[in-house]
Amino acid sequence: MKLLAEVGLVVLAGIVVVVCVSLLPDARPTRRRRVAPPAPERPDQLVALERLVVTAGTSAVHVHAYLRPLLVEIASRRLAGRGQTLERMPDTTARELLGDRLWDIVRPDRPFPEDRQGPGVAPQELRAMLGVLERL
Amino acid sequence: MSGSLAPRTPGLFALAAAGLIAALASGRPELALLSMPFLVFAGAGLILAQEPRLAADIELDRTRLLEGEAVVATVRLRNDGSDSVQVELAPVRSRNLALDPAGVVALDLPSGAVAQVAFAAHPRRWGAHSVGPLVVRARDRLGVTTWAGRLGRRLDVRAFPREQRLRELVAPMRTQPFLGTHVARARGEGIEFADIRPFRVGDRVRRINWRATARRGAPQVNERHPEHSSDVVLLLDTFEEARDQAGGTLDSAVRAAAGLARAHLARRDRVGLVDFGGTLHWLEPAFGITQLYRIIDALLASDIAFSYAWRNVDSIPLRVLSPGALVLAISPLLDKRSVALVTGLRRRGCDLTVIEVSPLDHISPGRSAADNVAYELWRLQREALRARLQSLGIGVAVWERDGGLGPALEGVNTFRRSVQHAVPV
């Protein structure tokens, strides 16, 4: 019985050794990890606008200080093709062409917002404005 | 080559040590006996290990090629040692050079044998690339010791940009008094008819227009436009680029610059180059094929260099921008400094055309709704910028990835003809 236990112990030790040897690292190099292709480089202009769209949705000050100049430039260039300017355009024509909300933002006499924490322009609303500008 | 233990050797010693400690702790000699083979194997491997004597050489079938072509790098590895070795090798390569086979190549190299491996190298874009030296790792027959090192030398490969073939070029508004192919506005000796005027003392008899003379009753002579060359300065914007996996705006800009340089030089124009970005490089305008090679060499070295330095027209040496030179600014118009430069050049009365390498093709809208709106806003902002430049009298040719440069230049020529007589800004 004792001999049988000793033989069993030796066999068990042999199995342990074989397992340990198989777990040893191979001398060959490990397979290289596949490197993911680099993400496209987004221009700073676009990244800044992505931030602006988010912040303009939360603050009236951002709309006035940062989004408005952009919309004014785009609207001016678009209207120039129709022989119109923002400064000389009658209020009724402007509201007809640009819509009430866009005209409220781009009109030359727009005052600085009194309520600095007032609502901004949500992305959906801005998309509609851009649609209007594109159709000009 | 530097030698070190193979990754499995410390494991072998650890197993042997574990067996000996277990034998001591339990008082059973069988465990010590069991650990002996590991100790003997690792020890014998270390004692018998000899540094392999390997020699390697790399050869390229050519060192200059066009984008899209491949160069074959042939690696020869010779074992000068007395024992056979197992070798793993991989050539070092520059970032934009893809090798085939891409991974590590494993070889069994008997004593005195020479192995030859061919790697196909594909440049992913134009530029100066390099292959070599070889990173080599060898191990002895027992796999207990490894040697690693670098063999061979570095070889340079120059991949030239695939140029845009151009049939129509931007016509300069002013020409230089050298023989060329542009019909000058001035009058003199040439082929193109300009006008008829009364005969003056000193006029050649062959210039007399006999029909007009007969009709007007006094001698009349033909006036002609001479054929002159022009100075063309290629202004390459390297401030910023938009890039995706298929390439970037700088890649396209360099192809356009190479094509424009070749086409203008073929028309006997003097061509110069200004690499305007984080670093400023320039080549003064000159004629001929040598200038083309100079320009292409300079283009191969161009890269985006990040910089906060504000540069404007004053940064460019006056001798590069000769009076009356046609400036072709190749730019994605992504950086404020580039826009300020082109408007500044125009305000100084420079004959300027912008070739806008559209970044929109390289950038897709973001995932969120807000990012989509921002992308639309960006697109409209760029259109407004283009309109502002055109209002200053700057022709803008928009070059999109799918279209050729030629049609874009045709459009800009039409614009330039319309503003040719406009009041200078």
Image (cartoon, coloured by chain):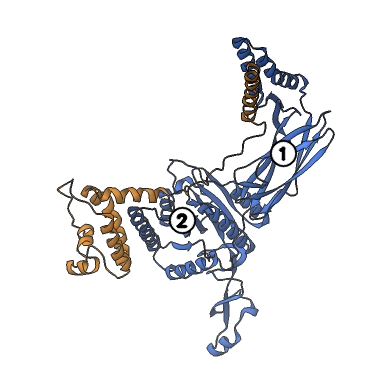
Q: Which quadrant of the view contains residue B136? A: top right
> Chain A's shade in the image?
orange
Q: Which mark is residue B366?
A: none
Q: Which quadrant of the view contains residue B104? A: top right
User: In front here: B308 or B219?
Assistant: B308
**Residue A126 screen position, x and y as percent:** 28, 58
User: In front here: B7 or A62?
Assistant: B7
Q: Is B379 located above or below residue B50 in the figure?
A: below
Callout 1 environment at 10 Å: few (<14), some (14 to 19), or many (20+)? some
**Who's the residue at 43% across and 52% down the image?**
B334
Which chain is mark 1 on?
A: B
Which chain is mark 2 on?
A: B
Residue B319 in view? no
Q: Quadrant of the N terminus of chain A?
A: top right
Residue topped by disc 2: B359
> Chain B's shade in the image?
blue
Q: Secondary structure at mark 1?
A: strand
Q: Which mark is residue B106?
A: 1
**Residue B404 screen position, x and y as percent:** 54, 65
